[in-house]
Amino acid sequence: MERPIFQPVGTPVEGLDTPALVVDLDVMEANIDTLHDSFRQLLPDGETQETDACVRPHVSCHGCPEIALRQVSADEGLIDMAPSCTGGISVASLGEAEAFASAGFNDILITGRVVTRPKIRRLLALARDNWVFLAVDNLRNVQDLSEAAVAEDAILGIVVDIDAGYGHGGVGSSDEALTLAQAVEEAPGLALMGLMTYEGPYSSTSQPQLEEESLRRLQVVNAAREQIDNAGIEITLVSAGSTYNYDVAARIPGVTEVMAGVYPLMDAQMSRFRPELQPAAKVLATVISHPVPERAVVDAGHKTTGPDFGVAVLEDVPGAVATRFSAEHGILELEGEATGEFSPNDKVWLVPYSLSLCVNQFDYFRAVRDGRLVGYWPISARGRLE
């Protein structure tokens, strides 16, 4: 567990104890507004955009209720526009759902599986006071959830998870989706809400290619929706897309919500795909050694940046590159104008390659505005994988 030195509000950002996970509130708020603005529809007396979808923020990537609150309340004060957000959130695990419910969120979609008896009991306890619904992709799970809900005289909302090519989970065809939807419809204690999918990461940063690939991957969802509808089963919710392709998914007929996740804070991986959104969360690190002119060492390593999928990017230091990390330290290779320029106690900024892995190393965001600390925001869902 992180044991930060709590410094007073107003501390200059470069005076924070390091390594520190810092969120710039001005950049974060601009990101939220940029994405949500693409979903907002003007009322009939103005221009209307070509989408009926809303955002359901997937908050697992940051795990922070303070950030999630700003996402779901993004439309406050915009009385002349239709909502951009469902007002609900999505999470990956039951533990995360419990953490956010404790923080006051009561419309939560759990995208991961809840299959063991202890977890199902916890799910039903959570559902007594909150609107919690979850994804399924097999008949056994449907049966177990139904039996438990009946025993507790409860109703659980269900979405059928469809594999759109990622190979992570979900049924693989529209026929299987129909079979599962029919089973949910017939199961006491369960209420079929609709369909969901996560297409997984994309490879092309070209917008035309990204759009083409998104439409191809989501064909299976549209086919399943049509087949289920033709069978006389009402589908009110279709959740698809992510920060990768939020604007594409939102325009696909039948999609009602987009589970965009990393967009408030961004990371080095996603910034390649969505240049209109800027990194708001970065790791502040301190140079602790400069043993030779071509190399410097900082106090942020694997245990800080979570570089499993890629190395953090050193920001705004021409000629310097973060090349490798040990458990506690990061190595900067220096050339050109960066050679010999660092001294111990100098500060540098690292943009995590994968934000969700980095965030899980910390208990708090240091929230800053105009270069000064405004507070410590708990990452309440950190480690809540159970």
Image (cartoon, rainbow, N blue to C red):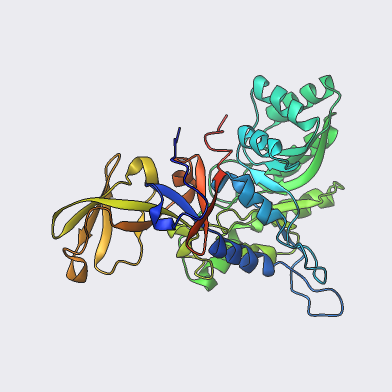
Residue at position x 60%, y 63% in the image: 29
How many callouts does the rendering have? 0
Q: Is residue 347 above or below residue 33?
A: above
Residue with the most extreme left position: 292
Instruction: Say whether residue 361 is left or right of residue 151.
Output: left
Percent from the top left, x then y, of residue 179?
Answer: 75, 39
Inspect this view and state whether residue 342 appears. Answer: yes
205 or 78, which lies in front?
Answer: 78
Left/right of residue 24 with respect to residue 170 in the rendered view: left
**Residue 220 screen position, x and y as percent:** 65, 54
Q: Does residue 343 appear left or right of residue 14 in this picture? A: left
In what quadrant of the picture does the C terminus appear? top right
**As drawn, 197 above or below 55:** above
Give the quadrant of the N terminus: top left
From the viewer's side, name the closer residue of 164 and 51: 51
Q: Does the rendering let one see residue 247?
A: no
Q: Could you say where residue 244 lies in the image, as x and y percent from the top left?
A: 55, 60
Query: Could you say where residue 113 lies in the image, as x and y percent from the top left?
Result: 63, 34
Residue displayed at 51% across by 64% down: 370
Left or right of residue 18: residue 242: right
Q: Quadrant of residue 60?
A: top right
Tell me the residue at 75%/26% (across/down). 125
Picture layout, residue 55 above or below residue 64:
below
Nearest to the observer: residue 244 or residue 375: 375
